[in-house]
Image (cartoon, rainbow, N blue to C red):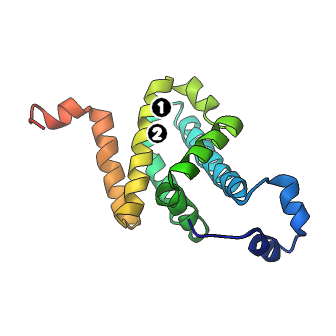
Amino acid sequence: MKEVTVKEIVLDLEIPRGSFYQYFESINEAYFFVLDQELIEIYESFLNLVRENDMNVMKAIEQFGEVVADEIFTEKNYNLYRNRYIGLDVELERQWKLYRNNTMKYGQDIMSIAEKEKMTFIGGIMHSLVQRLFTESWDRGAFLHHYEIYMHWIKRGIEEVFNGIAI
């Protein structure tokens, strides 16, 4: 993760240094706050898709790839997500998980729509796809192509897709 200083932030935002520390204890906490706000938007977008599709989670998942791609490939968000998926070392990852556990404001609505384990499984797949997007330098089209493949596997079932092919 690029080293950013509090000085750079307060100069860029034209706020007093003390104002920064009124809201955040550290630069990492500020980063986690911004990242968390973006993730809340993504979860809310997913929930809106579910509602727009008469609570059909699978139909919403099919459309969700475009939403995620739009979010990630927005210029202001690309580096934010890149840092999240390939820029956090073990200690920052631990801090991020602790931050999320203490502040998580999303996901509860999702749990009322589908079983927790299914959503955790799908979330893990999304995490893997986004991480690969950055580690393998995918463009938007490559991300959506892989997303469609993975969602096809989920929809049809891995066993049916491979239909007896030994792996």
Dots 1 and 2: beta carbons under 8 Å? Answer: yes
Judged from the image, the secondary structure of the residue bearing numbered disc 2 is: helix
* Rendered view: 12 above or below 104: below
| Most foreground residue, 142 or 30 | 30
Identify the residue position indicated by label 1 in the image: 119
Residue drawn at x 54%, y 32% is 54
* Residue denoted by label 2: 123
Q: Can you tell which quarter of the image residue 18 is in?
A: bottom right
Residue 80 — which label?
none
At x 67% / y 37%, what residue is drawn? 104
Q: In which quarter of the image is residue 2?
A: bottom right
Residue 160 in the image: x percent, y percent?
19, 31
Placement of 118 over or under 153, stated as above or below: above
The residue nearer to you, when weighing 61 against 13, is 13
Q: On the picture, is 114 further left or further right than 18?
A: left
In the rendered image, the quadrant that contains the N terminus is bottom right
Percent position of residue 25, x then y = 79, 53
Label 1 element class: helix
Give me the C-alpha separation between circle 1 and circle 2: 6 Å
Asked whether, in this view, residue 35 is left or right of residue 14, the answer is left
Q: Residue 162 falls in which quadrant of the image?
A: top left
Q: Residue at x 46, y 59 (%)?
A: 86
Q: In the rendering, at what x and y percent does residue 71 appear?
A: 55, 59
Residue 40, given in percent of the width and then of the height, sits at 65, 46
Q: Is residue 17 left or right of residue 69?
A: right
